[in-house]
Every structure is written in structure tokens, then in C-alpha cells.
Amino acid sequence: MTGVPEEVAVPSRRNTTLKVIKGAKAGGPTPPRRRLVTRAVPGPAEPIERVLERLDQEPVEDPTEAGDLTVVGDPAEVEDLPDPHPEPAGPAAEEPDVAAEPAGAVPRRRARALTALLVVLLAAALAGAGVQGHRWYVDRATDQARRAAVAAARQAAVNFVSVSAASVDRDLSRITAGATGDFKDEFTRGQAQVRAAVVENKVQSQGTVLRAGIVSGDRRRAVVLVAVDATVRNVKAPDGRPSHYRIQLDLVRDRDSGDWLVTKLQFVG
């Protein structure tokens, strides 16, 4: 196929007319048909210097905020941006600056340390006082218990040697009331024989404590030695006969009544 090539007019400025001739055949009687097409051809690019100059002349609403703006291409990169106000790291962040402390900071720390020391010393003193107080209480309670044990032993020894035919039942009951344990059981078993002998021999005995001393003891148990003189009258000695006894008594303190009771009684001389 032969024809006339397309004729293109060179643009002179922004709006240029492009003429395209189609359908013309060589040697043909029919005149060629023409169609005009108008197209906008882009002009030459604006120089970069003018663009920068124009951007510099545009106003900014808040210069302070504009200086802090950071353009981020990818939102995921925000986490990797450095902190504009980083905190100091390492030993400088952990150790305070002593030179920057107020003038009264050091005296206040010393005052607090002194107060803490005084509190510790006071607590130690109170603990020591508590221990000493407890010891004093224990010693005082033990001393009182020993004195009570000696008094109970003196009375039990007098009761044991002070028996009369006229008051034999009352006298024997008094001995039983002050006894406990094996001694009480043994005396109760032989009480009938003792009563018969006292009545038959018309015994009248009255004892007096000469001396009494504790051998050993604490707040619950005690051993006491008692020296007793007694005048014994009976059918064979109507005028009376002096007797001297040394009696050892083992006592325990009753938990319910707090009384000292005899658990063992024996003559030792």
C-alpha cells in the first residue's frame, strides 16, 4: 500500500496544531480527506531554582512546630527514630550528682542515720531491760515460792507431832489435809491404828519449831528440813517428856490451789 506519509507540524508554543493527512492516494481523482486533531503538548519543565525560590517564600503557620517536623516515608520506621530528648544512660544516670545537691541534703542524711542508730540502740536497751525484768520476776517468784514452802513445811511438822487424845480426829484430819501423793495414801491407810494408839495411851503432844531451812526448791517443788521440839505426855509419862526431832519434808505446789503439800515425811535424826 502506497500513500503519502503523515505530515506533522512542529509546535511553536504551548498550543500546537497537528495536521494528519490520511487516505490520499497517488494519482487518484478523489481529493484527500482531512481531520484536524487538537492535542495539548506539555511545555518545558520549570527550572528547579524557581521551584525552590517559590517554596522558600511560602509562609509557615507555626515556625516552632515546623522545626520539629520529621518526614517519615514508612510508618513502620517511626519506632526506629531516635528519641529527641534521650535520658542519660550508664553510671551517670544511676549515680546522683553530689555537687548538684542542695546545701542541707547531707546534714539531713546524717540526721536520719543518727536517728536510725538511736532507734536501734533504744530497741537493744529495751530488749536488755526486758530480759533483766524477766529474770528479776523469775527470781522474785522463786524466792516467794521457797518462803511459802518453808512456811508450809514448818506447819506440817508441827501438825505431825501435835496430837491429843481429846482432839485426835481433828488432829489427824489436819495432817491428811496438808498431804498428797504417797505420803497421804500411806498415812490414810494407817490412820485407824494411829488413832487407836493415841486414845489408848492418852497421848498429848505439843510441838514447837526451832529452825527450818530449805534444802532445794523452785516454784513447783521443795525439800525442807525442820528441827522440832515436843513435850509428850502419856500414861507412862504423865508429867511429860521432852523430845527432839529432825524431820525432812518433800513438798509440791498444787496447781489448782497454789498450796504446798507434803509428798514425803521422814525423821532424819
Image (cartoon, grey):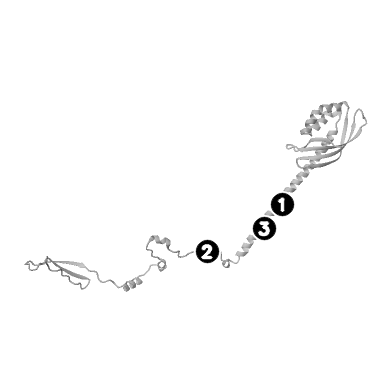
Residue beneath the point at 20% across and 67% down: 39
What amino acid does circle 2 point to?
A: Gly
Relative vertical location of residue 220 with respect to residue 235 in this rendering, above or below:
below
Q: CA distance from mark 3 to mark 2?
A: 36 Å
Query: Which of the labelled discs sits on residue 90, or is there none?
Result: 2
Cα–Cα gap, marks 1 and 2: 50 Å
145 vs 173: above or below: below
The residue at 81%/35% (across/down) is 265
Per the image, the residue denoted by label 1 is 129
| Label 3 Cα neighbours within 10 Å, binned few <14 / some 14-19 / many ≥20 | few
Vertical comparison of 125 with 102: above or below:
above
> 170 and 225: which one is in front?
225
**Could you tell me which secondary element the residue under label 2 belongs to?**
loop
Q: Secondary structure at mark 1?
A: helix
Residue 88 lies left or right of residue 249; in this view the side is: left
Asked if labels 2 and 1 touch by Cβ distance under 8 angstroms, the answer is: no
- Inspect the image, locate mark 3, and give the three-letter code of the amino acid beneath it: Leu
Q: Is residue 137 left or right of residue 102?
A: right
x and y percent of residue 35 in the render? 14, 66
CA gap between label 3 and label 1 equals 16 Å
Which structural element holds mark 3? helix
* Residue under label 3: 118
Give residue 151's position: percent from left, percent from top. 81, 39
**Marks 1, 2: nearer the viewer:** 2
Q: Is residue 116 left or right of residue 88?
A: right
Residue 136 x, y percent position in the rendering: 75, 48
**Image vertical order of residue 19 relative to residue 213, above or below:** below
Residue furthest to the front:
1
Which image quadrant for residue 31? bottom left
Residue 198: quarter of image = top right
Type of amino acid at the residue the image marks with label 1? Ala
